[in-house]
Amino acid sequence: MNMDKLQSVDFFQNQDLQYAFDALTKVLNREMITNYMNFLIKEKRPFSVCLCDVDHFKNVNDFYGHMMGDEVLQIFAHQIEKTVGKKGIVGRYGGDEFMIILDSLTEYNDIWE
């Protein structure tokens, strides 16, 4: 996770980020990403949420083992962050599920882009 990106978002400026990241994927953990979403709701700020997961991830673990599964999750998280860039914040919601919060993006075409 790019710390400069987080420091530019007002919610994260006053947060202790020492325990804010998922140890495996290095994106925000579930608690921090949901706290950020709740902050946006409380502040009545427009945003979009995207939830995504790795299809058939159980098959990866079963066939190739958990070490390969961990590597898949790391690569997947990195690719999501790279794709989202400065337009949003990525967190690991659980297992093979990731949450993307796009602050101020609410139009379908903007989100899809």
Image (spheres, grey):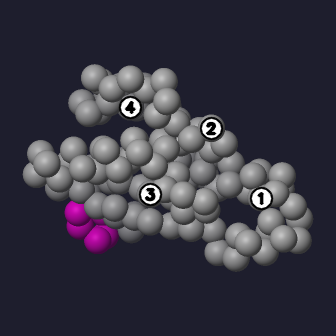
Residue 36 vs residue 96: left or right?
Answer: left
Compare residues 16 and 98 and report the one nearer the observer.
16
Q: How crowded is mark 3: few (under 14 residues within 10 Å), some or many (20 or more)?
A: many
Q: Name the residue under label 4.
A: 6
Residue 76 percent location from the top left of the image? 64, 56
- As shown in the figure, which amino acid type bears the numbered disc 3? Met
Q: How crowded is mark 2: few (under 14 residues within 10 Å), some or many (20 or more)?
A: few
**Picture quarter with the C terminus:** bottom left
Q: Distance between the residues labelled 1 and 4?
A: 27 Å
Task: Determine the image quadrant of residue 53.
Answer: bottom right
Mark positioned earlier in the residue sequence (2 or 4): 4
Residue 48 vs residue 64: left or right?
Answer: left
Q: How far apart are marks 1 and 2 (CA)?
A: 15 Å
Secondary element at image label 3? strand
Q: Mark 1 points at which residue?
A: 69
Up-down: is 112 above or below 79?
A: below
Q: Distance between the residues labelled 1 and 3?
A: 19 Å
Which range is magenta?
A: 106-110
User: Could one spot residue 92 in this view of the protein?
Assistant: yes
